[in-house]
Image (cartoon, grey):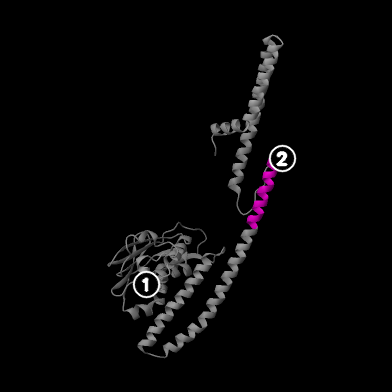
Amino acid sequence: MSSEREILSAYIKDRRRIWLAAALCSLVMGLVYRLYGIFWEPFVYGLCICLVMGLAAASADIYRYRQRHRYLLRLQAEVGQDLPELPVPKSLHEADYICLLRKIWEEKEDCLVKKRQEQQETLDYYTLWAHQIKTPLAAMRLICQGEDTQMGRDLLAELFKTEQYVEMVLSYVRLGSSSTDYIFRRYHLDDLVRQAVRRYASLFIHKKIRLDLRPLDVWVVTDEKWLVSALGQILSNALKYTDKGCISIYLKPEKVLVIEDTGIGIAPEDLPRIWEKGFTGYNGRTDKRATGIGLYLCRRILRDLSHTITVSSQVGKGTKVSIDLAVKELTGIL
């Protein structure tokens, strides 16, 4: 809120023409008195009376000016989905500005409605596409499972990656929609992590990567589906850039989940930008299939769940992803 000095300064600036006009009129009257040889006492006496009356009127005007300013500030704080009740205009220009504001607000509401409709249409299209594409993918999986050969196993691994890309598309579109399906409850962290690990069990076996899963005996407040999705994306990245060694999952104090791999690591100059949408960095230029969407989605999901994620890495030694799952206690959580 503006200080009293700022309000007074703004008032003087807004009313400066009136004060200049009053000073000019007083000067003209003084010249007229001088030219006609009239005594100065009546002029000075009248000028003092006018000055006192002017100061009284200005004080009342300043009070109304300040009250109106504070009322408009309160209206700014109340602006949300609906346009608040605007003050009654005091002049023709104020009425014009209020009409203009209402027109702009109506245009904004129309744009928001159109945007929501477009987002919903996009979501509906990609949801339908995802369900349709899953049918041939499931059929190919059944065909490949019937052939216990190296080629069959390789095809199954590629099919799994394709299915993950489909899920990534759905997550990306859903996060951009105006509505969410978050259901916050208390979950046992070990159960959630094991869900994510089971999804990638075939890739662990296919790449012969060892999993070091330590006890995660804590309860967290989160959304099951979205947290498992974020954990899956982190595991997918770890498996993608780890050719040998181990992926460790363990817990640090204050509910910090750590997923650490022995992969190729991330270049120091790329670390500050790994959360940017579409950024792939040096590893992405090496692996042409990288999209630069995975970590961006992870951060958005975890931010919406009130969790935080940090990454540290050394080239040639591996990457450590830390997820802080500690959130404030929420009432009404089952």
Q: CA distance from mark 1 to mark 2?
A: 65 Å
At horizontal 65% and vertical 55% (from top left) the residue drawn is 107
Query: Relative to residue 179, is residue 39 depicted above or below?
Result: above
Secondary structure beneath dot 1 equals loop
Q: Which residue corresponds to mark 1?
A: 287
What residue sits right under mark 2 in the picture?
92
Q: Position of residue 148 (x, y in %)?
A: 37, 90
- Label 2: how many Cα within 10 Å (few below 14, some 14–19, many 20+): few
Residue located at (46% from left, 77% from top): 163
- At 45% from the left and 70% from the top, the residue drawn is 229
Amino acid beneath label 1? Asp
> How far across and down, in percent of the image, does residue 16 sit?
62, 29
Disc 2 marks which amino acid?
Leu
SS at circle 2? helix
The quadrant of the image that shows the N terminus is top right
Q: Considering only order in the chain, which callout, 2 or 1, is on the residue closer to the N terminus?
A: 2
Residue situated in front as seen by the camera: 303 or 251: 303
For residue 131, which numbered disc appears in the image? none
Observer-nearest residue: 234 or 28? 28
Magenta residues span: 92-109
